Amino acid sequence: MSYLTTNGPAADAAARLGWGLIALSSAVIVIIFGLLLSALFRRRPIPPGDVETLGAIGRKGTGLSFIYVGTGFSTLMLFVFVVWSLQALGTVAGPPESPGLTVQVTGHQYWWEVRYIGAGGRGFLTANEIHIPVGTPVRVELSSADVIHSFWVPKLVGKMQMIPGQTNVTWMQADTAGDYRGECTQLCGLQHAHMAMVVIAEPAAAFTAWWNRQLMPPASAGTQLAADGQRIFQVRCASCHAVLGTDAGGLVGPNLSHLAGRQTLGADTIPNDPDHLAHWVNNAQDVKPGNAMPAIELEPSDQSAVVAYLETLE
Amino acid sequence: MSDQTAGSPAEFRAPDSAVLDGIWRTQPGVIGWLCSVDHKEMGKRYFVTAFAFLLIGGIEALVIRVQLARPNVGLITPHQYNQLFTMHGMTMIYLYALPMLSGFSNYLWPLMLGARDMAFPRLNAVSYWIYLFAGIFMYSTWPMGQAPSAGWFNYVPLSGRDYSPGVDIDVFTLGVTFIGISTTVGSVNFIVTLLRTRAPGMSVNRLPIIVWGTMTASVANIFAVPAVSLACIMLWLDRQVGTHFFDSTNGGSPLLWQHLFWMFGHPWVYAVVLPAMGIVSDALPTFCRRPLVGYTAVALATVATMVLGFGVWLHHMFATGLPVLALSFFSAASFVIAIPSAVSVFAWIATIWTGRPVFTTAFWYFTGFIMLFVIGGVSGVMTAAVSYDWQLNDTYFIVAHLHYVLLGINVFPVIGGIYFWFPKVTGKLMNEPLGKWSFWISFIGFNLGFFPMHISGLLGMPRRIYTYSTGMGWDTANLVTSIGAFVFAIGILLTVVNLLRSLAVGPRASANPWDAATLEWSVASPPPPYNFKVIPVLASRHPLWEGRLDDENSGRSLLESGILLDHGRETLATSVLDAEPDAVLQMPADSPWPLLLALALAALFFGMLFHVVWLGAGGLAALVISMAGWLWPDQREQRPTRSPAHV
C-alpha cells in the first residue's frame, strides 16, 4: 500500500514531489533543530542562571536578523515548492491521451461494484476486482450507492471521494503488469476497515481474454451437488445476487457471475477458497460484522451444495 | 453597567484593601460558589474541567492504541471503536483544546490588562456553565450505547437518519450547537474586554502576545462557529423534520456539509493554537532573561495566520472532485500560511539565542513545543501540495501531522503554561525535579508514539480502521506507537501528581517567583479578589523590568498609585487604541442567573434530544425567565456623576 514508489503516470509525478517534500522537510527539521540546540547550549560570556538565581535581565542585540533571514529563506523555499506542486498537479490531473477504457465504480457499504461498458453496449458487472490493460490510461467514474467512500489505489492513483448524487472522475494507468491493492479511505461505517479491492493490470491479450470471458455466462453446473446448489442459490441468494445466464438477478449484493475467478471474498477480507467461502455463505456476519449480508444458516448439506455451485462460476 | 465621564483627579486617598475585599469577594458557601462571577474563579473552573476532559480523552486514546497494537486484536467491536475515536476527537477538539485556553485567558486577561474583571462577568460565568453542561450532554448517551460514531467531522450521509438512526448523531448536532453558544458569548466577552477595559497606558503595542492570540481567536470564532452551528441545525432538521439539505436524492448536497464543517474546522485549528503560541511568546522570554525578539512581527504574524486561516478550508477537501483550478488557489494559500509560522519560530529561537536561558520545567516544555511545532509544520506543508495530498489524505500520516500540531502546539505550551502560572494562581511552587521528569518522559513518549505514525501513513495505512491484517507492513510501527502512547501517558500522569502534590505541600510562592515582566506578577500570589488595589498606569510593555533594560529614557509605569475605584464593583473603561481613561464601569455583583440560564438551556437541549416535550418547553420557559431576571434593571442606587478617585 506504500506510495513511496508508484507504477503509473497518474501517481509518478506526485511520488517524485513527495520525495522532494520529504527531503525539504528533513532539511528544515535538521537546520532548525541545529539552530535551536546551538541557541540552547552555545557558550555564553555569562553562564545561564538557575531557578533560584534567575540572572539579570538584558537585551543584547535585537535578534531581528534571525527573523529576516529565516523568514526570507522559508518564503523562497515555499515559493519553489508551490511552483513544483502546481506543476505536478497539472501532470497527474488528467491523462495525456484520451483513455481507451472507462470503468464505472460504485461504492457500497462495504464493497465495490465495477461496471464495464464495451462497444455496442455490451458491458458487464463485476465486483471488488478491476482488470485493466497495461500501458493504457483508464477513465474511472466514481459514485456511491449509499454513504461517502473514497477510491484509492496508492501505486496507481491518489484518492477521490465517491459521493452520492455526483460522479467524480479520475484516471489511472499501470505501466507494469501486476496486482495493485486499493482501499476505501473515507469512514463509511462499521466495516470501513474491510473495504479493499485489487486492480489487476495485465497485457492487452490477457485483458481481452478476461473481457470476453466476463461477457459469457458461466458453464452450467456439472455435478449433481452443484446443480442442487444452484437450486438452493435461486431460492436463498438470488434476490440479492446475480449470475449471468440464470434466473438470479439481484442487484443488492455483488454480481457473482464469475466469482470463482476472484482472488478474495468480502472485498478483500478473506481468501477465496472453499473453506472460507463456506464460512462466508453460512455466516457472513461472523466474518465481517455489520455488512449487509445476513446470516443464511443453511443445513450443512445445503451449504456444501451452494459452495460446490459457486466454485463452478469460473 | 453605566458609563460616567471621567475628569481630572479630584480625591486623593490611601487604598483600603479591606474595603475592596468586601466589595469584590465571593460569598462563602455553596450558594456563593454557584453564583460567583469572578474571572479568576471561572478561569480555574475552566482549567479543571478541561483538564478532566483531557484525561478522559487520553484514556479513550489508550484503549484505541491497545486495539491497534497488534493486527486483528478483538478487544472492542467495530461499533465501539467508531464510538471511541469519535468521542476522542470530540472531547479533545470541543471539550479540551479551546476551553483550556479560555481558562488561561479568563484567569490572566484582567490581571495582564490591569482590570478588576472581564467586561461582562456574568457572561463569563454563563459561558463556563454552558461549556460544562454541553460536555455532560455530549457524553450523556454513551451509557446507553449510543455515543456518536461518525467521526468528529460527522460527514453526511453516514450521519444521516438512513445510516445512523439512533440518538447518537442527534447528540452530536445538538451538543456542538450547544457548546457553540458558550464559545460565542466567551468570544464576545474577550473582544469587548480587550477593547474597553485595559488599564490606562496599555496601548495595543504593549499587549502580551497571549492577549493578541486570544483576541485573534475570538474574532475568528465569531465568524467560524456559526458555520458549524448552522450545519448542525440543518442536519438536525434533515434527521428530525425531513428537510433535504444534505439529501442528494431530493436535491440536497452531501458536499455542502463538508464545506460548512471545514469553514469552521480549519479556522478553529488556528483558534486552538494561536493563544497557546501566545503562552510561549510571553513566558519563554522570562526564562531567557530578555524581552521577546520581534514583538511586532510576532503579533502581526498571529493576526496574519488567522486571516489566511479562513482561506484554506478546501485543503480538507482536495479529494472531493472540485475543479483543479480552485484547488490550486487553496493549495497556494496553504503553503503561504507557513510564512507567519516561520516568523514566530525564528523569533523564539532568536530570543533563546540572544538571551540567557534558565532551564526550568516550563522552559523545557516551551523548547519541546518549538521542536514539535517545526515537525508538525513541515508535515503540514507536505499536505498543502494537492497531488501529494491525494496520497497522504486519510492515512496515518495525517494522524501524525494533526497530533504534532494539536498536542505540540496546544498541550505542550499549556503544560508549560501550567508550570509557569501555577504559583500565581495557587500561591504555591511546583516541584521542579518532578516537573523535569514529566517533561522528558512526555517528550520522549510523544515522539515514540506519534513519529511512527508518519511511517505507517507513508506505508498506506488508512485512518479510522478498527483493525488491520498481518502482512501489510504496519505491525512494527503500530506496536511502537502504542508503547509510546503509554509512555506519554505516564509523563502526563507525573504532571498530575506534581499538581496535586504541590497544591497540598508546595512551598509558598512570592508575588513574582520567576522575576517576570508583565502586570499579573505585580499582585500577590494568589491575587486578591479585586486584582489591583489601584488601577495601574502603564508606560511600557515590561512594567516590572523597567529600569533594568536599556530604557533609561522611557517613562515609568505607576503600579502603587493610580485610579482607586472603591465605591462599588467598578473598573475603568479606556479608549480602544491608546487606552486613555474614558469612563467608570459599574460591574455586576455575583448572580444566580448565569447558572440558571445555563440549566434552562440544558433542559431545552435534553428535551430536544430525547423528544421530551415538557422538559424542552419547561427549559424554554425557564430560559425566558432567566433572561428577564438577568436583564432586570439594577436596583443599586446610581451614584451621581463624579471623577474617579486618585491616590
Image: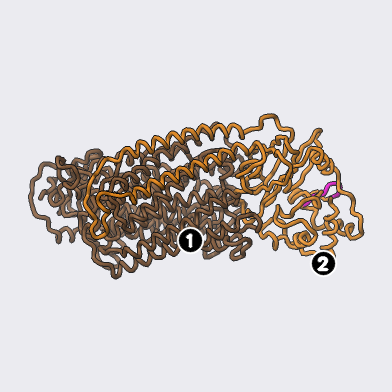
Chain colours: A orange, B brown
Label 1 or label 2, whichever lies nearer to me, is: 2
* Labels 1 and 2 positioned on one and the same chain: no
What residue do we see at 43% from left, 43% from top? B267
| Percent coordinates x, y for residue A208 in the rendering | 81, 39
Q: Main secondary structure of the magenta part?
A: loop
Query: Circle 1 sits in a helix, a strand or a loop, which is it?
Result: helix
Name the residue nearer the viewer: B371 or A150. B371
Please give left or right for residue B414 compared with residue B449 in the image: left
Residue where numbered disc 1 is placed: B139
Front-most of residues B16 and B336? B336
Q: Secondary structure at mark 2?
A: helix
- Whether residue B327 is in magenta: the answer is no
Chain to which the residue tagged by mark 2 belongs = A
Question: In the rendering, at what x and y percent does residue B512 appear?
Answer: 22, 57
Image position of B497 with respect to A216: above or below? below
Which amino acid lies under the numbered mark 1 shown in the image of this protein? Answer: Tyr
Judged left or right of residue B527, residue B376 is right
Q: Which residue is mark 2?
A: A300
Estimate how packed mark 1 is, as few (under 14), some (14 to 19) or many (20 or more) residues with alpha carbons within 10 Å.
Answer: some
Q: Position of residue B208 (x, y in %)?
A: 28, 46
- Mark 1–mark 2 Cα distance, whole angstroms, equals 46 Å
Q: Which residues are magenta?
A: A241-247
Q: Is residue A244 magenta?
A: yes
Residue A218 rendering spot, x and y as whole percentages: 86, 48
Q: For residue B44, what is the image quadrant?
A: bottom left
Task: Answer left or right for A225 relative to B179.
Answer: right
- Looking at the image, can residue B430 be seen? yes
